[in-house]
Image (cartoon, rainbow, N blue to C red):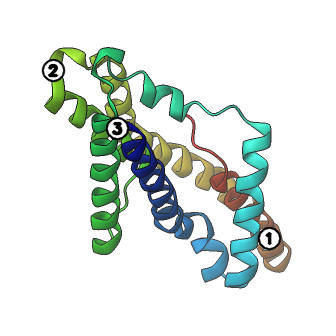
Amino acid sequence: MEFKLLIIIVVLAFAFDLINGFHDAANSIATIVSTKVLTPFQAVLWAAFFNFMAYLVFELHIADTIAKIVDTSAITLMVIMAGIIAAIIWNLLTWYMGIPSSSSHTLVGGFAGAAIAFTGWDVVHTGKIVKIGAFIFLAPLLGMIISYLFSIALLWISRKGNPFRLDKRFKGFQLLSSALFSGPRRQ
């Protein structure tokens, strides 16, 4: 029975990864496609290449973070399966409704919720959950402030620039930001 459950978990993990891919893919290529910097096919190849390269270059901290949000005494195959199923359902729901959400945060919530349902609140490392939860709210705020300041600086720097030359430079910046967004997310 344990082996069958393990096989089901592996299949569900692949399903989650596939759903994560189509859930997040549009985020990394939407700008470069809508501004016609690249065609949709070129943009998908661009994002796929940088996703692959990111795994060769960067350390991955998300899996480590997810594994350490609950005590090991609460980790069973059923808890892992329940967490993955919850994350899959949430990802599909938010994708269908067009609500932006983070697949890694969804997995953290599903796994923590499954562990709480199995053992109780005491198994969760609340410090890690609070840190993750805080950045769910802080990241967009920080992004807004930094992008505002960056926009003001760019407007000031390029106020006397040639619009055609600036357009070419901004297309290059769009490719750079898409490449960076295609890489792994750190927790």
| Image spot of residue 105 (x, y percent) | 38, 42
Residue receiving disc 1: 166
| Mark 2 residue crowding within 10 angstroms, few (<14) / some (14–19) / many (20+) | some
N-terminal label among 2 and 3: 3
Q: On the picture, is 126 further left or further right than 31?
A: left
| Image spot of residue 85 (x, y percent) | 30, 52
Q: Nearer the viewer, mark 1 or mark 2?
A: 2
| Image spot of residue 113 (x, y percent) | 22, 36
Determine which quarter of the picture holds residue 78: top left
Residue contact between numbered discs 1 and 3, judged by CB atoms under 8 Å: no
Label 1, label 2: how far apart the Cα atoms are: 54 Å
Label 3 secondary element: helix
Residue receiving disc 2: 121
Please state which amino acid type lies under the numbered disc 1: Leu
Residue contact between numbered discs 2 and 3, judged by CB atoms under 8 Å: no
Q: Residue at x 78, y 61 (%)?
A: 49
Residue contact between numbered discs 1 and 2, judged by CB atoms under 8 Å: no
| Mark 1 residue crowding within 10 angstroms, few (<14) / some (14–19) / many (20+) | few
Which label belongs to residue 80? Answer: 3
| Image spot of residue 115 (x, y percent) | 24, 29
145 vs 60: above or below: below
Residue 119 shows up from this direction: yes
Label 1, label 3: how far apart the Cα atoms are: 50 Å
The front one of 96 and 19 is: 19
Q: Residue at x 71, y 82 (%)?
A: 41
